[in-house]
Image: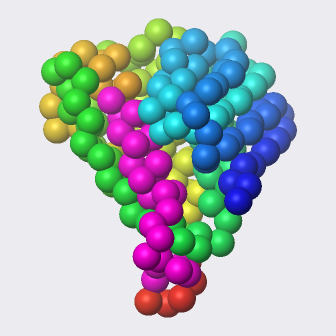
Amino acid sequence: MNRKANVIRETNETRISLSLDLDGTGKSSLDTGICFFDHMLDGFARHGLFDLEVTCHGDIQVDSHHSIEDTGIVLGTAIKQAVGDKNGIRRYGSFMLPMDEALAICAIDLSGRPYLVYDARFTHDRCGEMDTQMAKEFFYAVSYAAGMNLHLKVPYGENDHHIMEAMFKAFAKALDMATGFDGRITDVLSTKGVL
């Protein structure tokens, strides 16, 4: 089964090309123009065992908003395409990920119904060149473009880098679980018969 997607999105603010392989080995090639964001996407790919390539040319002279939000839209679209009809997948995934003093909790339902519940706080406005408030915008964009119910919570943490990285890695592990196959599931895991 080929669970890959290639998505291109061009607007007046960004030009993004992204390829995703859900059944990869964690390889990535990333160039968003925002080094800290590349670092987060690398953690997502490596810990979810997804192969991910992203090139983004955005208006970062303004700020990081459009590039990060639009990358979220494109990644969510790619996830939706790569998952396909969802036959045989677990649908749900959750993970609790510690990173030093920080703890991130992520739960996912690939229900086709988008929703984001987000509870995380940062002590500074930026990590590197990435605005910390853009974490919420990124995950919102992913959840709505993918049609996923996504819950992210950081109950505690002090170092913003650790908080952000724990969130991206927890999301990766939960998504890997949700998109994984279970041999006992022969069609779509839903009483409706469709997701």
Q: Nearer the viewer, residue 186 or 105?
A: 186
Is 140 rendered above or below residue 134?
below
| Image coordinates for residue 93, horizontal then vertical, percent | 37, 57
Q: Quadrant of the N terminus?
A: bottom right
Q: Is residue 114 visible?
A: no
Residue found at x 53% / y 80%: 186
Residue found at x 25% / y 24%: 99
Q: Quadrant of the C terminus?
A: bottom right
Q: Residue 157 lies in what quarter of the image? A: top left
| Image coordinates for residue 119, horizontal then vertical, percent | 27, 43
Is 67 rendered above or below residue 82?
above
Residue 56 left/right relative to 171: right
Q: Residue furthest front?
A: 183
| Image coordinates for residue 135, horizontal then vertical, percent | 44, 33
Residue found at x 59% / y 70%: 86
Residue 109 left/right relative to 193: left
Q: Is residue 64 magenta?
A: no
Residue found at x 25% / y 42%: 96
Q: Is residue 180 magenta?
A: yes
Question: Magenta span covers which residues?
Answer: 166-190
Residue 123 left/right relative to 4: left
Q: Across the whole image, how many numbered discs are drawn on residues? A: 0
Q: Nearer the viewer, residue 164 or 20?
A: 20
| Image coordinates for residue 22, horizontal then vertical, percent | 61, 47
Q: Nearer the viewer, residue 152 or 85?
A: 85
Q: Nearer the viewer, residue 53 or 61?
A: 53
Q: Residue 132 lies in what quarter of the image? A: top left
Residue 62 left/right relative to 43: right
Is 31 rendered above or below residue 53?
above
Q: Residue furthest bottom?
A: 192
Q: How is the image coloured?
A: rainbow
Q: Is residue 104 visible?
A: yes
